[in-house]
Every structure is written in structure tokens, then in C-alpha cells.
Image (tube, rainbow, N blue to C red):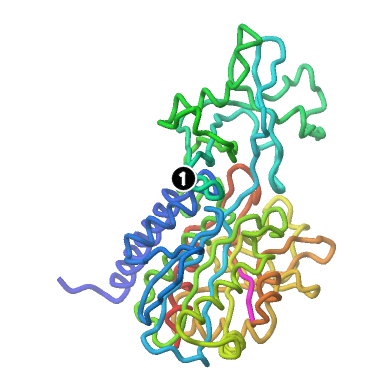
């Protein structure tokens, strides 16, 4: 059968569309399985090991081999993975894809059980800049980690926990008792956002209520539990959305789309040549990154230096390699909201499925500049990857990300970019399937460039 040029192009378009949607479903599955930063890093570890990466331990001596693939974790919420070329050229430096593993949510406080009438609620604390109203009236549950005893006093064991059933809800106050609710009502973080866990008949039952719930859902022994880091998450799954399924609607798109895309980009890079390719997923970006596992620490720099030392290089050669390096910082970007166009720049604003937003700021809250943008343009030459400039509307402060922080610590050239999205920091965000695919392809191209 002979096909016309038009028919061939239409067949090619449909094939690409199928590939893009298939990857979008992978991203959704990854997000659904990653309700906390600890699950994000655990799932990244599984993917890496399935693809031949070897885990390294910070307290052990590293014996790295050229051509090897490795990963290391910090606090079980930050992860660094890297591949080594067969013959390292210091003038190629490090190619670094940066992202972050955390998202705004609620952290459960110690001794969280609170009783009002016969209703038991959990005392929580807001983590990051969440849109609080979006968490109301939807099924919620608990995920995070439980810390248990081990043979080493200073290295207790971490057990990830995910209770996969509707445990809780944060109910709104009825409009009859809150007549101004549709005109905007201030939400009290200490009172209004505490999730209802159940009914209780006896005040004594509240003691260790959460602990007993954890014990009923796991094989952990009560006497082994030392502490926990637990968070509230929404049970509703991500999905493709739109007439042509052109959107992804899911929790934690900021920034798990970047985590998954960067990780896959590292894995799918066909030839690491003579360079060192690095993927990093930092924790705590949403609260400023100033933690031992955040971007505003020396963790990445120390890890890179340790890689060089393990390969037999000295401090001087490490600093030389840094000067030849490049950081691609990937984080969520704002898409133009059709109901609020006045909030976006008149000429440089994000459009969904029109390409990755290259984030630019005169005050350097984003690290992109003419030099790094020129590098990016050359990386994507000859590909189908699209980019578009993004600048905040001049009356809007906007946010920042790990790019300026990491590039300052490392003293390297860097660029900030990301997938344009709506409802950023809502319990459920919205982005385009093609933009997510572009990010994964960019990661692969970035790591493949010699």
C-alpha cells in the first residue's frame, strides 16, 4: 500500500503521540507510588538498581571504576546518581541535572492525637507553601518513615510506610455557618487544617492512637519504634486529562516530573563518553534548602570531590573539573492562567505543551543568563525539543529554586528551566504531556553531549 506524504506525517504524529502519552503514564505511576520524599528516593533507588547502578555507602571507602554506574543517598530523602566515562577528560567536567524530591504538604506533629467532642484529629504542621484550601474535603492518608532500633546506636533503621486507604479528611465548615467563604476566608493553620481520623468513645483510647494504627498496618514491633517522620498525602491518583488527553493532572508534579525525567535521562544516555554525568534530587527545596540534605549544603560538592578522589585525582584537578562543568536545574514553571493573564509577563510567559520554560530573572532568583541559554540552544539543535522564555511579571515577586543555590556552592555555569504548569502548590497540579516528554529528552541529550 502506497501512502501519501500527508498520510505518512499523520502516522508519524500518532506514533509520537502514543510514545508521549506512554511516558506521561509512567510519570503518573511514579508519582502515585511516591507519597513522601522517602518513597521518591526509594523508588529512584529501585529504578537505578534495575538498570545496573551500584549503591555506595557514605561511611565506606569508595572504589570507583571508570565506566561504572553508582548512586548514594542522604537521609533517605536526597539522592545522587552518576555515570563515569571510560576515560575521564577533566576538561569535560561534570554534567549535572538537578531537581528536588519534596512538595508542599502537612507534617504530623509528635503526640498528634487531639479530641474534640468524640472526634479525634491529628495535629499537623504545614510544610512549604501549600494552597491550603485544596486539601479540604478529599480522602487523605499517611506516608513517610518510621525509625526503628538497629545494632548500631548511631545508625537506627529506616522503614518507609504508606497506608494505602482513606484514613482522614479535612472537612470544610458549612456555608450556612461561613457565609463569606466564597469571598475569601483566612485559613487558620493550627485549627482549620487538622484532619479527622475517626470517632473515639474513651479519652484513654487516644493514647498511642497513631502508633497503634501504624502497628496494625506494618510488621514493626512496638518496642522497636523510636520515632517517625510522617506526612499527610492525598489518595486520589494522577490521570491524563483533556479532550485529547493532553494534560497530566496529579499531585506533586512540582517537582516529581523533573525527578523522573532527569533520572530517565541519565539512564537512557547511550554513551557517557569521557565525562561524568550526575543526577541529583535534593530534599527541602520547598522550605529554603538550608538543611544537611538540601541544595544549600555542601552535600553535592563534597560528593563530587569524593568521586574525583576515588578516581585518583587531587583537589586541584577537582577544581579544574568544576570550572568545566554545567548544571541544568529543573523545577516547575508557571503557565499563563487563562483567568489571570495580568499575573504573567506580556511577552515571555509559559504556554502548556509549547516547550520547556527557560526561567530568567534580573535579580538572579533564577540562574539562567545569556551564556547558559546559548549552551541550552546548542544542546537541543537538531531535536524536536521546544523551549520558551519565562520571566515573571514585573509586579510579581515569583519564586526561586535550587539553581542559584547549587551554582553558587559549586561555582559553575547553570540554567534554570522547567515544565509550565497551572495550580502550582495545589494538592493537584496540571501540566502538559509534551512538556514532560521534552524534559526527559533534554536530560538524555544533555548527558549524551560530548
Residue closer to the observer: 290 or 413: 290
Compared with 127, 13 (above or below) is: below
Image spot of residue 269 (x, y percent): 38, 75
SS category of the residue bearing label 1:
loop
Residue closer to the observer: 194 or 373: 194
Quarter of the figure with the C terminus: bottom left
Magenta stretch: give its range.
413-417
Residue closer to the observer: 14 or 222: 222
Quarter of the figure with the N terminus: bottom left
Image spot of residue 154 (x, y percent): 56, 50
Left or right of 228: which side holds 9? Answer: left
Tell me what residue is drawn at x 75 percent, y 72 percent: 361
Q: Residues within 10 Å of mark 1 (few under 14, many from 20)?
A: few
Compared with 295, 146 (above or below) is: above
Left or right of 91: which side holds 201? Answer: right
Image spot of residue 166 (x, y percent): 50, 27
Quadrant position of residue 9: bottom left
Quadrant position of residue 281: bottom right
Looking at the rendered structure, the number of numbered marks drawn on it comes to 1
Image spot of residue 404 (x, y percent): 70, 72
The rendered magenta stretch, by its main secondary structure, is classed as strand
Tell me what residue is drawn at x 76 percent, y 61 percent: 398
For label 1, the residue is: 151
Which residue sits furthest left?
Answer: 1
Amino acid at each position: 500500500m502506497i501512502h501519501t506524504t500527508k498520510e505518512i506525517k499523520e502516522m508519524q504524529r500518532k506514533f509520537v503521540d502514543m510514545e508521549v502519552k506512554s511516558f506521561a503514564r509512567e510519570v503518573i505511576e511514579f508519582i502515585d507510588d511516591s507519597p513522601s520524599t522517602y518513597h521518591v528516593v526509594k523508588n529512584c533507588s529501585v529504578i537505578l538498581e534495575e538498570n545496573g547502578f551500584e549503591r555506595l555507602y557514605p561511611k565506606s571507602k569508595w572504589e570507583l571504576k571508570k565506566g561504572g554506574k553508582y548512586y548514594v543517598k542522604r537521609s533517605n530523602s536526597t539522592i545522587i546518581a552518576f555515570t563515569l566515562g571510560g576515560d575521564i577528560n577533566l576538561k569535560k567536567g561534570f554534567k549535572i541535572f538537578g531537581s528536588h524530591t519534596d512538595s508542599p504538604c502537612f507534617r504530623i506533629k509528635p503526640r498528634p492525637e487531639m479530641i474534640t467532642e468524640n472526634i479525634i484529629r491529628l495535629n499537623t504542621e504545614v510544610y512549604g507553601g501549600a494552597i491550603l484550601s485544596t486539601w479540604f474535603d478529599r480522602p487523605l492518608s499517611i506516608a513517610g518513615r518510621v525509625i526503628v532500633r538497629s545494632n548500631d546506636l548511631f545508625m537506627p533503621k529506616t522503614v518507609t510506610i504508606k497506608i494505602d486507604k482513606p484514613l482522614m479528611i479535612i472537612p470544610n465548615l458549612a456555608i450556612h455557618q461561613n457565609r463569606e467563604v466564597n469571598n475569601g476566608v483566612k485559613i487558620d493553620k493550627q485549627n482549620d487544617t487538622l484532619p479527622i481520623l475517626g470517632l473515639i468513645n474513651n479519652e484513654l483510647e487516644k493514647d498511642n492512637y497513631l502508633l497503634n494504627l501504624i502497628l496494625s498496618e506494618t510488621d514493626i514491633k512496638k518496642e522497636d519504634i523510636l520515632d517517625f517522620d510522617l506526612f499527610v498525602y492525598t489518595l486520589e491518583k494522577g490521570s491524563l486529562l483533556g479532550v485529547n488527553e493532553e494534560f497530566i493532572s496529579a499531585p506533586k508534579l512540582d517537582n516529581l516530573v523533573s525527578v523522573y525525567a532527569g533520572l530517565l535521562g541519565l539512564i537512557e544516555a547511550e554513551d557517557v563518553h569521557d565525562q561524568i554525568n550526575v543526577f541529583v534530587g535534593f530534599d527541602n527545596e520547598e522550605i529554603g534548602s538550608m538543611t544537611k540534605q538540601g541544595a544549600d549544603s555542601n552535600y553535592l560538592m563534597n560528593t563530587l570531590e569524593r568521586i574525583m578522589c576515588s578516581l585518583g585525582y587531587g583537589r586541584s584537578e577537582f577544581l579544574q573539573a568544576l570550572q568545566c562543568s554545567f548544571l541544568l536545574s529543573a523545577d516547575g514553571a508557571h503557565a499563563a492562567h487563562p483567568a489571570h493573564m495580568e499575573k504573567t509577563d506580556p511577552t515571555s510567559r509559559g504556554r502548556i505543551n509549547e516547550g520547556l520554560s527557560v526561567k530568567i530573572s534580573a535579580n538572579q532568583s533564577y540562574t539562567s543568563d545569556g551564556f547558559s541559554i546559548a549552551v541550552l540552544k546548542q544542546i537541543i539543535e537538531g531535536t524536536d525539543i521546544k523551549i520558551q522564555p519565562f520571566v515573571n511579571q514585573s509586579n510579581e515577586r515569583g519564586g526561586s529554586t535550587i539553581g542559584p543555590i547549587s551554582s553558587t556552592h559549586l561555582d559553575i555555569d547553570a540554567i534554570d528551566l522547567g515544565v509550565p504548569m497551572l495550580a502550582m502548590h495545589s494538592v493537584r497540579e496540571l501540566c502538559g504531556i509534551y512538556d514532560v516528554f521534552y524534559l526527559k529528552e533534554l536530560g538524555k541529550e544533555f548527558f549524551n553531549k560530548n
